[in-house]
Amino acid sequence: MQGGNILAAQRTAEMSLPLKWELPGGKLEADEAPEDALVREIMEELGVVASAMEPLPFVDRAFKGKHFRMLPYICQLIAGTPKALEHAEVRWHPLDRLFELDWAPGEEILLGKWVEMEYLRANSRPVSSPAS
């Protein structure tokens, strides 16, 4: 996230789920921690250096007979400007217009969980116990 925007990447016409939008990231390699995989994938896909800051709720989904577990993180951009190295387009998209994009199905689930979590966080009130 950056200034009320989320980084979105549009899949190319040749990829599965063509022209759908997704969050940057990718697959874990053998013996790779999720945070390390995310940093590596962001460098490969966008040409930037980032760090994984906060884990978000994971999403399990099936697609074309395969099981996928999505392990999202809020990341911090450390160096560089994101470029579409493997995607048709990348853009900073306003959070208040998040669901205007045509997201890939798993991304919609993940973003829905994240929006709910942010809403709960913003609207939580400390619970005080009655004085004894």
Image: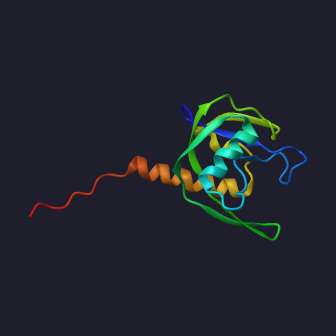
Instruction: Please provide percent x and percent y for residue 33.
Output: 61, 57
The answer to whether residue 121 is left or right of residue 14 is left
Of all residues shown, which one is farthest toward the left?
A: 132
For the image shown, how many numbered marks are present on the structure? 0
Q: Looking at the image, which residue is at 66% across and 28% down?
A: 80
Q: Give the image's coloring scheme.
A: rainbow
Instruction: Please provide percent x and percent y for residue 47.
Output: 72, 34
Camera-nearest residue between 34 and 1: 34
Q: Is residue 17 above or below residue 82?
A: below
**Quarter placement of the N terminus:** top right
The answer to whether residue 53 is left or right of residue 87 is left
Q: Quadrant location of residue 128?
A: bottom left
Residue 24 shows up from this direction:
no
Q: Looking at the image, which residue is at 58% across and 39% down?
A: 95
The answer to whether residue 54 is left or right of residue 121 is right
Instruction: Please provide percent x and percent y for residue 132.
Output: 8, 64
The answer to whether residue 96 is left or right of residue 66 is left
Camera-nearest residue between 22 and 45: 45
Instruction: Please provide percent x and percent y for residue 126.
Output: 29, 53
Camera-nearest residue between 18 and 29: 29
Of all residues shown, which one is farthest toward the right?
A: 14
Q: Looking at the image, which residue is at 59% across and 54% down?
A: 112
Of all residues shown, which one is farthest toward the bottom?
A: 65
Residue 40 shows up from this direction:
yes
